[in-house]
Image (tube, rainbow, N blue to C red):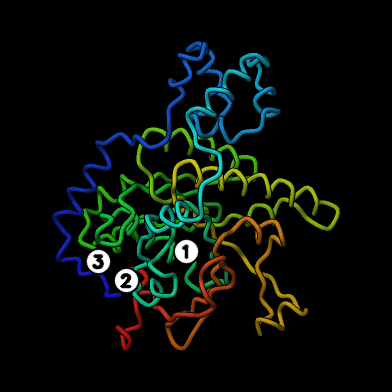
Amino acid sequence: MSTINPNEVVNENNENQNNLNETVYNGPLKLEHLLPSGLTKRDLEILRENGYHTIECLAYAPKKALLSVKGISEQKCDKIKSACKELVAMGFCSGTEYLEARTNLIKFTTGSSQLDRLLQGGIETGSITEIFGEFRTGKTQLCHTLAVTCQLPVEHKGGEGKCLWIDTEGTFRPERIVQIADRFNLNASDCLDNIAYARGFNTEHQMDLLQSAVAMMTESRFALMIVDSATALYRSEYNGRGELATRQSHLGQFLRALQKIADTFGVAVVITNQVMSKVDAMAAMFQNDKVPIGGNIIAHASQTRLFLKKGRGETRICKIYDSPNLPEGDATFSITEGGINDPKDEK
């Protein structure tokens, strides 16, 4: 897979960015589809106030959750569920049909052709990709690059959508976006306008931001959602074994909410994770004493898990830690002024 030639896409990129600002995304079904079923506009307002902004959100929600919404009776709940079954396909399909759907999945470039090859095309939309490693291994730098490449046209290995970024460690730098946008000949101002940024201050606020994210994605086409880092606030707020169960339960709820967003809006969800030192059979298996935190909760929530580590000099190594479809392997990349790229001697 060849690297991007920005000179070939400059005009299309700028035109595409303007379209992202002007076009309303018509993907998920809006709640107004429920009006013929007997619900009122006030009912729709109540649902939105409680975080249900699309028909898909209602379809995926358990009946118990809807009944807990003040103002939604069991009769209204039955009407909602009945209407959703008619509007959202939630039954069986053949393996052939599912293969065709996966073949049409959008993947967008990481900025490195070697890393794209490892991922068989790039970052996959509609699923959760976890990136973990020690400090200075390139986690946040990869996120900055993806926040730009997700805005490229699909035919140029982009996601043709906006980016939403939840920052829990204060590491987002708009200056880096400007530098990376310049590499891809994107208008830096438009590129920044297409990134919705919020700082997360605690685990409850981090969860609340997801409701705001759903509301925004209902109105515009987003291709990527970044949470950097998904686990940092949980580590600082929950201490000791006595709070471990509570921490894991809350983290599980957050990750399930992320998966619902990926399912509903078809966005790529990229989360970063920290590591801890651990000497056991697992560490020995991977010949490394650094393992991702979060335990089985985050392990089962992430479809693709990427382990980043330092290589020789300024290079970094990405290893497939776990994936349902990608074979084991690794790729070398470098961090440049223009974002993630191939090492100079391997372009």
SS type, badge 3 = helix
Of callouts 3 and 2, the N-terminal one: 3
CA gap, disc 1 and disc 3: 18 Å
309 sits left or right of 298 in the view: left
| Quarter of the picture holding the N terminus | bottom left
68 sits left or right of 110 in the view: right
Of callouts 1 and 3, the N-terminal one: 1
Compared to residue 201, the image places residue 312 above or below, namely: below
Please tell me in which quadrant of the rendered image residue 154 appears: bottom left
Q: Which residue is identified by label 3?
A: 183
Q: Nearer the viewer, residue 150 or 76?
A: 76
SS type, badge 1 = helix
Label 2 near label 3: C-beta < 8 Å?
yes
- What's the residue at 13%, 55% (across, down)? 11
Q: Position of residue 262 (x, y in %)?
A: 50, 47
Q: Nearer the viewer, residue 90 or 171?
A: 90
Label of residue 140 in the image: 1
Q: Identify the amino acid type marked 2.
A: Glu
Q: Which residue is identified by label 2?
A: 337
- What's the residue at 69%, 82% (across, down)? 285
- What's the residue at 35%, 47% (across, down)? 162
Q: Position of residue 114 (x, y in %)?
A: 38, 77
Mark 1 surroundings within 10 Å by alpha-carbon count, few (fewer than 14), some (14 through 19), many (20 or more): many
Mark 3 surroundings within 10 Å by alpha-carbon count, few (fewer than 14), some (14 through 19), many (20 or more): some
